[in-house]
Image: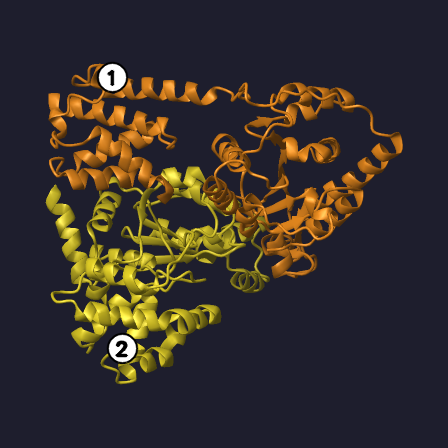
Chain colours: A orange, B yellow
Amino acid sequence: MKRFGDLTAHVVTFCRALRVRGLTIGPREAADALRALASIDVSDRRLCYLSLRTVLVTRHEDFPTFDAVFAEYWNPPAPEPARLQDAGADELPGDGEGERPKPSVIDWLDQALQAEGETPVAAYSPDEALTRKDFSAFTASELDEMSRLVVAIARRVATRLSRRTRAVQRSHHLDLRRTIRHSLRRGGEVLDLAYRRRKIQKTRVVLLADVSGSMDLYSRFLIQFIFALQHALGQIETFVFSTSLTRVTDAMSEADLRQALDEVAQRVPDWSGGTKIGHSVRSFLHLYGRSLLGSRTVAIIISDGWDTGEIDVLRDAMDELRRRVGRIIWLNPLLGGTGYEPICQGMRAALPYVDVFASAHNLDSLRQLEKHLAARAR
Amino acid sequence: MHTGINDIQQLLEGEGYVADRSLSTALYLAIQLRKPLLIEGAAGVGKTEVAKVMARALEADLIRLQCYEGLDATTSLYEWNYQRQLLHIRLQESTDLPLEVKEREIFSEPFLLKRPLLQAITHPKAPVLLIDEVDRADEEWEAFLLEVLSDWQVTIPEIGTIAARHVPYVVLTSNRTRELGDALRRRCLYLWIDFPTYEKELAIVSRKVPGINSELAKQIAAFMQMVRRAKLEKIPGIAETLDWSAALIALHRDHLDRDAVEQTLGVLFKHREDADLLRTQWLDHVLQGLQTVENTNGPWSQDTIDRAADQVLPKVTGSRRP
């Protein structure tokens, strides 16, 4: 079946192209696409389009990407898929003859998985003001106070009791199954009530800290905060950003604070450069969103909202973040200044998506933050 | 092959559902590939209706599971009938049966309360299982659901493993209050239902509202197209359109005017802010838009309505809320 072999090859290339553009597509999806095409009239281009979209796309946001790739690969003048010989056919794994489709799908998956395993590296660009800062010591009493406070804050975040049990039953949850079972031993008399303990659900915290020029004054302070939070919490992922995003979770775990701060300074190439918040949040969503986000995640963004990137990018990124986490807390050091109104464009665009908007310019403001973390906004 | 899709289209039409091609294709593939179908879209665009119509078209039973926060395995899969167990223990009190036997008795199938998922699995004929508003359940349950959808078998410690007699047809709906996990998404086929076009909405109104005259139906459908351009808390869907049409008819209105709309705003908008916004800032423009369409010669279409709307409606900046 030459025709089927060709179709297989094309579907596989097509899937790969979608994958390159960021859609989550594995061999199962590719196999489903083939099954779908096998059950329809493939000479009907509109029907092919609808079928492939139904099988391969899993969210509405990906429709435009799909449309673009579809137009590239399955465009006229060859509406008959069997005759589609162009569109990168020469780089296909396997020539698509007869029984070959399966290995080619697996090869393709291998490549795709390898591509995914690559760790993102901090982008370096000569435009970024490359000033590596030496973090000199904070006073000892400041450090102590900070750690104590932050541990208290972190505990609040770390153990949020499950809302559902709290809503249903104020005290314990009766475990009827075990109660009945126990009662058997006493001839059906219910003497001991068995309880189910509510599960303690851990909150995961993702921290995105702005370290760009406009945040310079606060950077040292915030790095301290991040560090202490991470120590108390364990379950916290830390990223710093200005024009690009860098994951610093591991660096932050260094036992020696001083060493940790040095490491951050070294790892972030654009310390005190400009800010592209939207771009940074987007690349965070893209690279780490799948593994880190969920309704029990609290995202804390520390930034003054001075965004030099495009506002639409920021708005879209915040919109997506909003839908993928339980709560967004935005800490803005400028809010501490009297009479500050969030008038800068970036802050205004982001604000509708933020659950808690608070200041973070000194220890007092962090104490305030403790309140926000304790009370549920939603 | 291809006729399968046309058959489905006809079945849907026969059931009174106005289906476009993407819907019938998705349903056809869900049946052919036996994969769950995830339907997303704003509230009130007829997502739930798809499952109901699918069940009628397949002549299958519909089993519905409404999701909510806190939904867990006992309320979605099975629960023991404790009252009945207690009663049984009492009845057996005087017998000398050993404890193990008594225990085995009360933890057997007659004492099992089947919840929707188990019902679907043990149903004698493959049913349509509607998992409604899955975005409202929490992530643990989503993971649990994923397991059920993968294996189609359920293990009850006291009884053993129950495998599905027939794999049910599964339809999941989501209003996107929460982003669903990738694992669940990838398990499903995907269908996005948008707000209907003028033509589709007109067809729905004409078909679903008995006794409506064609002028009023056209006006209602065009009105909805224009109103959905406003920045609202809750954009009215087809369900609201139908309720509104019924209300207008109950009030013996045969055309739309300011009075008729103001009297019935509460049916169309579920938020007071939305109703206020429409009354104070939009209503005059929309009515003017209807007049503009009226004055153009030729049939009404999405195109003529869009053009009229561009001319007279207030400009809305920024994107519409999802």
Front in this rendered view, residue B297 or B50 = B297
Residue B208 is at least partly visible in this image: no
> Which residue lies at the image location 67% right of the left edge and 23% below the top edge?
A264
Q: Determine which residue is flagged by label 1.
A: A92
In this view, the residue farthest toward the right is A141
> Which residue lies at the image location 33% right of the left edge and 69% below the top edge?
B285
Q: Determine which residue is flagged by label 2.
A: B256
Relative image position of residue B84 (x, y in whole percent) = 52, 63
Q: Quadrant of residue B49?
A: bottom left
Label 1 amino acid?
Leu
Relative image position of residue A109 (x, y in whole percent) = 35, 22
Relative image position of residue A375 (x, y in whole percent) = 69, 54
Residue A63 is at least partly visible in this image: yes
Label 2 amino acid?
Leu
Vertical relation: A186 (above or below) B244 = above
Q: Chain of mark 2?
A: B
Vertical relation: B104 (above or below) A138 = below
